[in-house]
Amino acid sequence: MRPGAKQLRRVPALAKVANAVLEEIDMFSRVVRFPRNAELFRQGTMPVVLYFLLDGLVALSSSMPDGSAAVVDVIRPVGDLLLASIFAALPYLQTAHAVSETELIAVEAPKLRTLAEREPALGGALLRAVSRDSRGMVRHVRDLKLRTSAQRLGAYLLDQMEDREAPRAEFRLPFEKGLLAARLGCRQENLSRAFATLRGFGVETHGGQVILHDVAKLTAYAVPDYLGDPELVRRGR
Amino acid sequence: MRPGAKQLRRVPALAKVANAVLEEIDMFSRVVRFPRNAELFRQGTMPVVLYFLLDGLVALSSSMPDGSAAVVDVIRPVGDLLLASIFAALPYLQTAHAVSETELIAVEAPKLRTLAEREPALGGALLRAVSRDSRGMVRHVRDLKLRTSAQRLGAYLLDQMEDREAPRAEFRLPFEKGLLAARLGCRQENLSRAFATLRGFGVETHGGQVILHDVAKLTAYAVPDYLGDPELVRRGR
């Protein structure tokens, strides 16, 4: 099934593309679904399609030459998988797994690359999108180098809030704690310790349910990136 | 002074651009020099020029809203500063300092953006370059999540070798140990411990002078990225 203009417009990089260009993209795109735990693609293989995640969550892990692997990121809707590999035209650096049932748009990569070279506005939009992805990874490196595990967890929880102005929030963790620890770059026992530390900053958990009783206090402790970053304030993650 | 075609061609993203396009870029580019410790640009400000580093080293650090800062990367020739911020047209996420005397090409950013939209081959080359930068940051995240400090140091030292096939190598550290620790994401006392650990893998140091007596043994321990990565094998770094 083709996604159609409405679904394609949900992709930030395509939101402002001309109708005629969007119709052309629609011709070589389709909507695909994967069950939980399915592998979307594997590190080391060449990208054939570019995915945009419409619904669900996808974990990206990357392994070293000795086989040890780390979760680099967990992609939320509407994120891309993976613009940088598509446009570098190089083998994937990461393996993608569906964390939950997922719905995605799959766009044929060679046709998109050709179209981007012919349509400068599309090329420009994709260049901006890759640039934003790249800046996201810079923030990730900074997060790992500067924040303690407890601060990383705090910043991550604050980032889950729907309304950043709310003084209090309650939500479910989007995925299980093993994956959360991996995403944050700590061991599971460190994650438990981090949750214990955050109790002092008004964070209550029951299984996957999280209550932030004092958003101001947690914000002061975890100093989430969006505090000083106009890009994040505007866009929400 | 304009850089001229020969210097511009040293930039990987511009190596294959048509002569006419390169001449146009040359018209709004100039060669600039900065002394050691000079600030090239500051986090939070809007990019005006895109720099390509021809000679010297530049440290990129990024600070959190509370003022604490981390060195995200140290750029070597011929690296870019910073394609992602130029093409996202968003404030810098990093502050750049000259680690040594530097020579750079400064390209007026708005003119380059306009030209990239008009010349698809240039747009495509820049899209590939940003994509490669983004993949570099993915490797950095993986490095921080998977390797111990000693392994990170080992992988970094192996990456400094001019000839990766050599069984033994000797070179000077490109910058002082405080900055090296920051780049690797550890404290200076951890760096000293990491060097001590690496003695068991044939690494000898005298101040900034490094001798790798047993490249094979160190490689097996640190599993540097280029082992399984065709992109890095081909390109160096």
Image: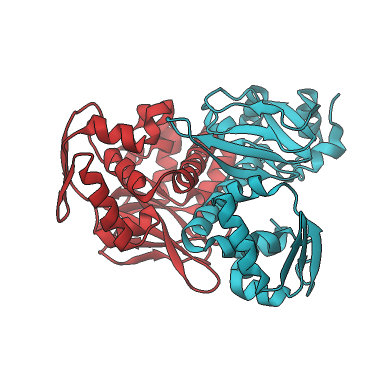
Chain colours: A cyan, B red
Number of marks: 0
Q: Is residue B61 left or right of residue A55?
A: left
Quadrant for residue B201, please give it.
Answer: top left
Q: Residue placed at 67% from the left, 27% from the top?
A: A39
Placement of the C terminus of chain B among the 4 image quadrants: top left
Q: Residue placed at 70% from the left, 38% from the top?
A: A58
Q: Is residue A23 left or right of residue B126?
A: right
Q: Residue placed at 75% from the left, 44% from the top?
A: A78
Q: Nearer the viewer, residue A8 or A77?
A: A77
Q: Residue furthest left?
A: B206
Can I make out residue A171 in this image?
Answer: yes
Q: Nearer the viewer, residue A162 or B206?
A: B206
Q: Nearer the viewer, residue A152 or A79?
A: A152
Can I make out residue B78 in this image?
Answer: no
Q: Position of residue A124 (x, y in %)?
A: 62, 42
Q: Position of residue B98 (x, y in %)?
A: 31, 61
User: With respect to residue B119, does A30 lie above or below?
Assistant: above
Q: Nearer the viewer, residue B36 or A69?
A: A69
User: With respect to residue A93, does B176 lie above or below?
Assistant: below
Q: Residue placed at 71% from the left, 58% from the top?
A: A235
Q: Position of residue B50 (x, y in %)?
A: 44, 53
Placement of the N terminus of chain B among the 4 image quadrants: bottom left
Q: Position of residue A234 (x, y in %)?
A: 71, 62
Q: Is residue B207 left or right of residue A187?
A: left
